[in-house]
Amino acid sequence: MMVRPLPGKPLKVRNALLGGEVPLVCVPLVGSTGEDVMAEVENLSSINPDIIELRIDAWDVVEDLDSSMDLLRKVRSAVGDLPIILTCRGHWEGGIKEVSESAKDSIYRGAISERLVELVDKELTYGYEKLSEVKALAEKAGIGLIVSYHDFDRTPSLSFIYSQLATQIRFGADVAKVALMPRSEEDVLKVFEATLAVRRDFPDVPLITMSMGALGQVSRLAGGLYGSDLTFAVGSAESAPGQIPVERMRGAFDLLYR
């Protein structure tokens, strides 16, 4: 077992610990219809993730608040104690489809007020004012805020990656996240180096960092050794390029972290 740099304040999310000795394995649910989503939920018992991500930017009912909330409640009831990350990714950062700001805001407020999820993910590009509003609501409900940045085209400079994560933390993130597309092996190393630097300079905050695509797959397996506390794996379908099936991820984690 290799020792990895842990956050000083890991985040307890139901029966999982974000920032524990072994990084969490998260499976995104990316179904578009209610039937598709519930079929993905039924499949979870066979793959046994630590946490799931609900990608509501895939939902065909996302612009209908009542229908979206009904589906959220069904998922919450069906998954029991499995923690949920609520995500409506902006189209400019890899969202599955465009969703109106009013629909996003309404669903997030509803999910937070009913405590249907454990974590909500919002992009740093929403700006300090909007993030502060979500942070206040989430904190009052005991829900964690992930602040994230994605680039599906390239990997920026090491200093830019560090700055993005540091700004997320300064903006009040309970968890800071970046996902970037590498064009070279050196790009993958930049993500490792930035993650480790942020872990050392902001030692309390859990981090989620990764390089995407086939070139970045090593970061999904070994990122925890540099301070990343969660990785995404394939359940029924991948939500980003380069995700690895859960069973293969578990085998690698047994070698690296246990």
Image (cartoon, rainbow, N blue to C red):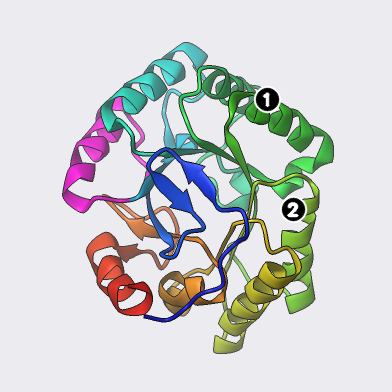
Task: Identify the main secondary structure in magenta.
Answer: helix
In the picture, which quadrant includes the N terminus?
A: bottom left
Picture residue at 21% right of the left edge, 52% below the top: 47
Picture residue at 47% right of the left edge, 41% below the top: 13
Q: Foreground residue, 95 or 77? A: 77
- State which quadrant residue 103 falls in: top right
Q: Secondary structure at mark 1?
A: helix
Mark 2 or mark 1, earlier in chain: 1
Q: Is residue 48 magenta?
A: yes
| Residue 169 - label | 2
**Does residue 249 lie above or below 157 as drawn?**
above
Q: Residues within 10 Å of mark 1 (few under 14, many from 20)?
A: some
Q: Foreground residue, 128 or 242? A: 128
Q: CA distance from mark 2 to mark 1?
A: 17 Å
Picture residue at 30% right of the left edge, 75% below the top: 252
Whole-percent x, y for residue 22 in the image: 41, 64
Instruction: Determine if residue 105 is in view.
Output: yes
Question: Which amino acid, by three-letter code, is at mark 1?
Answer: Leu
**Does residue 232 lie above or below 11 as drawn?**
below
Residue with the mark numbered 1: 137
Instruction: Determine if residue 96 is in view.
Output: no
Q: Is residue 168 magenta?
A: no
Whole-percent x, y for residue 202 in the image: 73, 63
Instruction: Give the residues drawn in magenta, as a range.
Output: 29-49
**Does residue 220 lie above or below 40 as drawn?**
below
- State which quadrant residue 21 falls in: bottom left
In the picture, which quadrant includes the C terminus?
A: bottom left
Question: Which amino acid, by three-letter code, is at mark 2?
Answer: Ile
Outermost residue toward the front? 8
| Horizontal arrangement in the rendering, residue 10 relative to residue 35 (left or right) | right
Q: Secondary structure at mark 2?
A: helix
Whole-percent x, y for residue 235 in the image: 28, 52
